[in-house]
Amino acid sequence: MDDSFQDSGDTHDGGNRRQTNRRASDNAEPLTVTIEPSSKKQYSYEAKQYRLDRTRYRLEKKAYCAAHWTMTFLIIYTGLTLIVAVMSIITGFAAKESADTAARQLEMTDRPWVAVDVSITSPLAYNDKGVEVEFSFTPKNIGHSPAQNVLIDPQLLPIFMGDDVREIQKNICDSAAKAQSRMPRYVLFPEEPYTQPFGLSMSSESIIAHWGKQPPGMGQPDPIPIALVGCVDYTYETSRRHHQTGFAIDVLMKDGRLPLRSLTPLAPSSLILRQHPEGGHIAN
């Protein structure tokens, strides 16, 4: 019985203590915790620095975008300009080529063209000095505008029918283009032919040299290789350069053989002029 009463008393004392603690808790003052921020000055500086950094970032981004698009625009603009320039150059070349072609066609149509007829007007004679013979040259302008500064430069040369005379003629024509007062020059109008006489000669030394060295005891060969080589040189208003008509003509007997020294003098009626077969015929 004593133990039960003691337990009951302990329980009653525990309950009293809990009620006493509860009343003490209810009457206790609340705990207040105050969190004080950093100083106002420090907070204001950091906020201002943040705003400045944000503003700087936005400005730099805008500047970068502007520079990027400006560069892109310049690249595109430069590319388009280059394309336009190339197309302009191509168009210019095409236009110039068309103009040059038209000018060449017009020149070929309207320019003068000079042809020449040649005839023998004296007997072909042979003496100690060599061969002497006279020719008549009749240049004819078969074009459509006047030929100016016309000059005929013929030379009588020892040439066989198979010899190539192109290099010889080129030298003659180059000399004719540079001649200043060695021979008279004149204007030749279309459909108005002009006759010009020439007395030409060829030395016996040149004839012997062209035959070459002969066997011992053999005299000078009787056949005489003769060719008339030269050109007609002229200019015209719309061209700065010289133009030329070349000729290379063999002087032969009527039967086609070389003239014979033993038969000289040979009358013009016993001779013929034949176009040389190896070069010497040009017109430019």
Image (tube, helix red, strand yellow):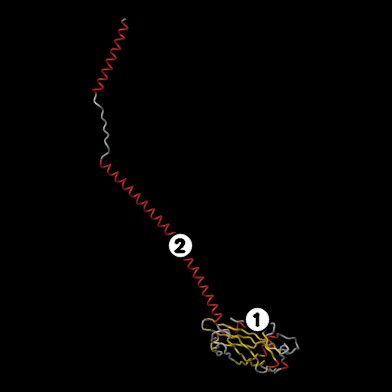
Circle 1: element type: loop
Q: In the image, residue 39 lies at what x, y percent?
A: 26, 39
Instruction: Look at the picture and state if 283 lies above or below 136.
Output: above
Residue at the far top: name it: 1
- Front residue of 105/126: it is 105
Whether residues under marks 2 and 1 lie with C-beta atoms below 8 angstroms apart, the answer is: no
Which dot marks residue 279?
1
Mark nearest the camera among 2 and 1 is: 2
Residue 184 figure quarter: bottom right
- Which residue position holds label 2? 80
10 Å crowding of disc 1: few (<14), some (14-19), many (20+): some
At x 65%, y 81%, the residue is 279
10 Å crowding of disc 2: few (<14), some (14-19), many (20+): few
Q: How many marks?
A: 2
Q: In the image, residue 245 lies at what x, y percent?
A: 60, 84
Q: In the image, residue 272 lies at what x, y percent?
A: 69, 89
Disc 2 residue type (three-letter): Leu
In which quadrant is the N terminus drawn?
top left
Instruction: Look at the picture and state if 150 lies above or below 66.
Output: below
Residue 41 figure quarter: top left
Mark 2 → mark 1, Cα distance in angstroms: 56 Å
Instruction: Look at the picture and state if 156 lies above or below 108.
Output: below
Q: Earlier in the sequence, mark 2 or mark 1?
A: 2
Circle 2: element type: helix
Q: In the image, residue 190 lies at what x, y percent?
A: 56, 87
